[in-house]
């Protein structure tokens, strides 16, 4: 493996990273990932180990075993090599409720060692970017969940990071904010490593050209959306069923969507062979792949192996 990246192109490598918590939960199980400039969407159901993996990648938690290298430097033993260029938005981001967004960001900028002058300029840029210029003087205690999330995003970008790690960043954002945020992240990913975790497929399908699917601590797939989609090519079907048949279909197949219509329930299901009942083959989307992979059934019978993971 080439350990000498080109000047200016950051690389973050996770090698066989494992995290076993006290009590024995194996939250991350031998995950290896190599990230260069660009956005990697880490997709997995609740409890898959995404936050644990992100905390480890952000040097907040030490792995039980495995290595993390930033531009070739081992950051488990030398975390500052990454921390100096890292922006991190944890899932449980907390603020001081009596401070305004400007005061809070100024405080963090001082902690990060930014000069007062460049901090002021940067904070105004960021407040504008996350659409909080007007609200920037109000105490954070009066902010909505979505506004606080945007403050979290601004703090992660304070020091113009080379590596940006954002854990479920769109939680609490309204649809318009989600779109704005996704666009912002894909712009940032042009020359930075951006790692974004989510359990919502639509959060990443329009921005991530690179997707990793995790479940039960393990990395199950990694690839471009087109590659992942090929896995369920020809195996996604739509059918309309009466209310009585729906339960039986749920037993037999991984169901990726249901919509009630005037004629009954329109189901989208995964099956390697024609499921019968007039089902029509349809073009797969990422939600289908995600469910197939997480249910451990891609390429096999596509029968439901577990309860609707990730929904
Ligand atoms: N500090 C901890 N101590 C013990 N177990 C933990 C700890 N943090 C996480 N876990 C466990 O590790 C597993 C993975 O949790 P983690 O939060 O990393 O998953 P996740 O994919 O981020 O899920 P969510 O989106 O629900 O947070 C879960 O079983 C969780 O209960």
Image (tube, rainbow, N blue to C red):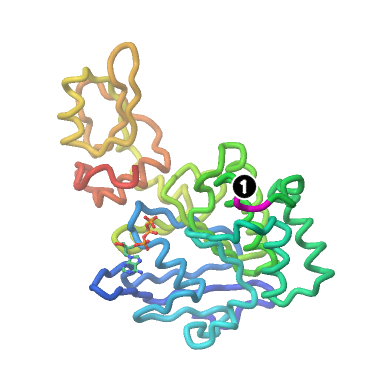
Instruction: Estimate how packed mark 1 is, as few (under 14), some (14 to 19) or many (20 or more) residues with alpha carbons within 10 Å.
Output: few
Report the side of 81 relative to 133 (left or right): left
User: Image height check: is 46 above or below 191?
Assistant: above
Residue 245 location (% of width, % of height) = 17, 23
Is 236 located above or below residue 309 in the figure? Answer: above
Q: Residue at x 51, y 57 (%)?
A: 196
Residue visible at 31% across and 50% down in the picture:
293
Q: Is residue 142 magenta?
A: yes
Residue with the mark numbered 1: 142
Q: Where ligand 1 lies, by image quadrant?
A: bottom left
The answer to which quarter of the image holds residue 85 is bottom right
Give the dominant element type of the magenta stretch: helix, strand or loop: helix
Is 283 drawn above or below residue 6 in the view shown? Answer: above
| Residue found farthest to the right | 117
Q: Provide residue 311's location: percent of width, then percent of height.
A: 34, 42
Q: On the image, which quarter does residue 72 sit in?
A: bottom right
Left or right: where 188 falls relative to 226? right
Magenta span of residues: 139-143
């Amino acid at each position: 493996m080439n350990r000498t990246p080109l000047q200016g192109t950051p690389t973050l490598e996770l090698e066989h990273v494992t995290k076993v918590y006290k009590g024995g939960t194996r939250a991350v199980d031998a995950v290896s990932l190599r990230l260069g400039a660009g956005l990697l969407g880490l997709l997995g159901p609740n409890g898959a180990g995404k936050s644990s993996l992100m905390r480890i990648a952000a040097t907040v938690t030490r792995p039980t075993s495995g290595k993390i290298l930033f531009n070739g430097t081992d950051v488990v033993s030398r975390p500052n090599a990454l921390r100096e260029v890292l922006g991190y938005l944890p899932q449980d981001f907390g603020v001081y409720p009596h401070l305004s967004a400007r005061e809070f960001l100024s405080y963090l900028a001082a902690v990060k060692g930014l000069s007062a002058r460049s901090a002021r300029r940067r904070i105004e840029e960021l407040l504008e970017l996350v659409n909080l210029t007007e609200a920037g003087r109000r105490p954070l205690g009066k902010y909505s969940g979505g506004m606080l999330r945007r403050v979290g995003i601004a703090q992660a970008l304070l020091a113009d990071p080379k590596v940006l790690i954002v854990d479920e960043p769109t939680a609490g954002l309204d649809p318009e904010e989600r779109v704005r945020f996704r666009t912002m992240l894909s712009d940032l990913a042009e020359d930075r490593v951006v790692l974004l975790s989510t359990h919502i497929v639509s959060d990443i399908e329009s921005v991530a050209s690179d997707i990793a699917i995790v479940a039960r601590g393990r990395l199950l797939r990694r690839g471009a959306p087109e590659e992942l989609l090929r896995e369920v090519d020809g195996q996604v079907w739509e059918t309309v069923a009466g209310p009585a048949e729906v339960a039986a279909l749920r037993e037999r197949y991984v169901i990726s969507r249901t919509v009630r219509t005037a004629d009954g329930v329109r189901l989208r299901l995964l099956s390697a062979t024609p499921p019968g009942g007039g089902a029509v083959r349809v073009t797969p989307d990422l939600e289908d792949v995600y469910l197939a992979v997480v249910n451990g059934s891609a390429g096999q019978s596509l029968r439901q192996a577990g309860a609707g993971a990730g929904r």
